Amino acid sequence: MTALSDPSTMGIDPIRWPDVVRIPRSFKASAAESVTRGLFRRAVARLAIRVVMPDGTTLGGCADDPAAPTMHVHNPRALMRRIGTGGLIGFGESYLAREWDSEDLAGLIAAFAGGIDHLVPTSLKRMRSAYLTRKPLSDKPSTANSRSNVERHYDLSNDMFATFLDPSMTYSAALIEGPVDADSLELAQHRKIDRMLDQAGVGEGSRVLEIGTGWGELALRAAARGAHVDSVTLSSEQLAWAQGKIDNAGFAARVDLALRDYRDTLGQYDAVLSVEMIEAVGLEYLDTYFAKIAQVLAPGGTAVIQAITMPHHRVLETRNTYTWIHKYIFPGGALASVEMLRDTAARQGLSLGDDLPMGQSYAETLRIWAETFDAAHERLEELGFDETFRRMWRFYLRYSEGGFRADYLDVHQLTFTKGAAA
């Protein structure tokens, strides 16, 4: 039987990464190890993957196919204990602890995501809330918590994000048409932004509100059309970068950037634009979000929102689940379904017109980001990001890519209109 190992012996900082170093050793973990082992074997047998155990034994629906996405398990006991006590959080922490690996992480995750509805027995799904960690109240995206949630991700380091984003520093799905690589990704990002501006009718003299500034590329391109833009963000790092970009482009008179919660926005606008910010709003605050858009949007105005989504039944199943992404990447984040967004907007007087799904564009965007991120390991090390951090972000990027490839996740550009005044 494989002995439990200690990740701290592999140079993992126990202060920075306590739950990666800590292998569950309780009686509960011991019992969970045995149960999870059987569930794991039955689950992977249904998937088009290959799992290689330390003794060379191969499992999975494609156990004899070396070309299948392959999971190399180095410490099965630790992996089973982590999954048995922490679910997908434990699965991800086991990867950070180097207890398993894969040369095709996105393909492996896509296979798991594609079969997710059948992997977990219905009886265990009902018990999810009883044995998995609950969402911390401190992560709830209330007015009091939203800024700290944003800072924990977007304020990591502008230099870190610059290692893998395209020169426009656009951190959202590009609109990809045909083959794309790192050199052409910026054009695809501009295509995405310009389509949103076109949908909203942004031009000379348009009054535009942007909810979620990012690093300023949308505000810049709107200003270049002659629009006047107010853009709000909760990230001080992004604000500083975006302000420099706007100033250097000569558009300071047309763009006002502010460190402000969207809920505190006032004024009236012809167009409201928001790119992948709604994921930080929280499902319980969707009515508040759309009410604010309806309040500031002029009669006959247009809102264009780019949103990452999940199928409606999965949102309902997982809305109260605390995930690896919450714990390590996006505290307080939540994905809605298109149905939820449409219906919530309708309650606030906003009608959904155009809907462009672009999930496979996101899969390609993430592939390029992940490849560029991996190639920048020396620069990331210079910036002070250790191997466990780099492994965490590799897992996040490939995990997300796999979700989009399997259609477990999607992203939509949604165009809403506000009725004209009577």
Image (cartoon, rainbow, N blue to C red):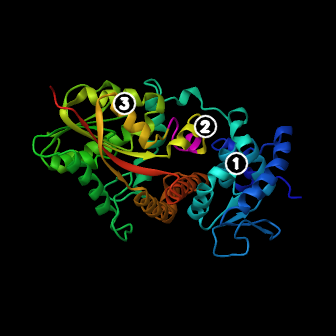
Which of pointers 3 and 2 lies earlier in the amino acid sequence?
A: 3
Residue at (39% x, 32% y) in the render: 344
Residue 261 visible? The answer is no
Nearer to us: label 2 or label 1: 1
Q: Which amino acid does label 2 sit on?
A: Thr
Note whether 322 is above or below 157 in the view shown: above
Q: What residue type is labelled 3?
A: Tyr
Q: Bounds of the magenta span? A: 325-333
* Along the viewing direction, whichever of 279 and 117 lies nearer the viewer: 117
Quadrant (top left/top right/bottom left/bottom right) for the N terminus: bottom right
Residue at (21% x, 32% y) in the render: 419
Residue 130 lies in what quarter of the image? top right
Residue 339 lies in what quarter of the image? top left
Q: Report the disc number at residue 321.
A: 2
| Residue 69 coordinates in the image, percent (x, y) | 63, 68
Looking at the image, residue 195 sits to the left or right of residue 344; the answer is: left
At label 1, counting other C-alpha atoms closer than 10 Å, the crowd grade (few under 14, some 14-19, many 20 or more) is few
Circle 3 residue = 289
User: Does residue 332 show up magenta in the picture?
Assistant: yes
At label 2, counting other C-alpha atoms closer than 10 Å, the crowd grade (few under 14, some 14-19, many 20 or more) is some
Query: Which element carries disc 3, helix, strand or loop?
Result: helix
Calculate the distance from the C-alpha at mark 2 to the C-alpha at mark 1: 15 Å
Query: Which element carries disc 1, helix, strand or loop?
Result: loop
Calculate the distance from the C-alpha at mark 3 to the C-alpha at mark 2: 22 Å
Residue 177 visible? The answer is yes
Q: Which amino acid does label 1 sit on?
A: Val
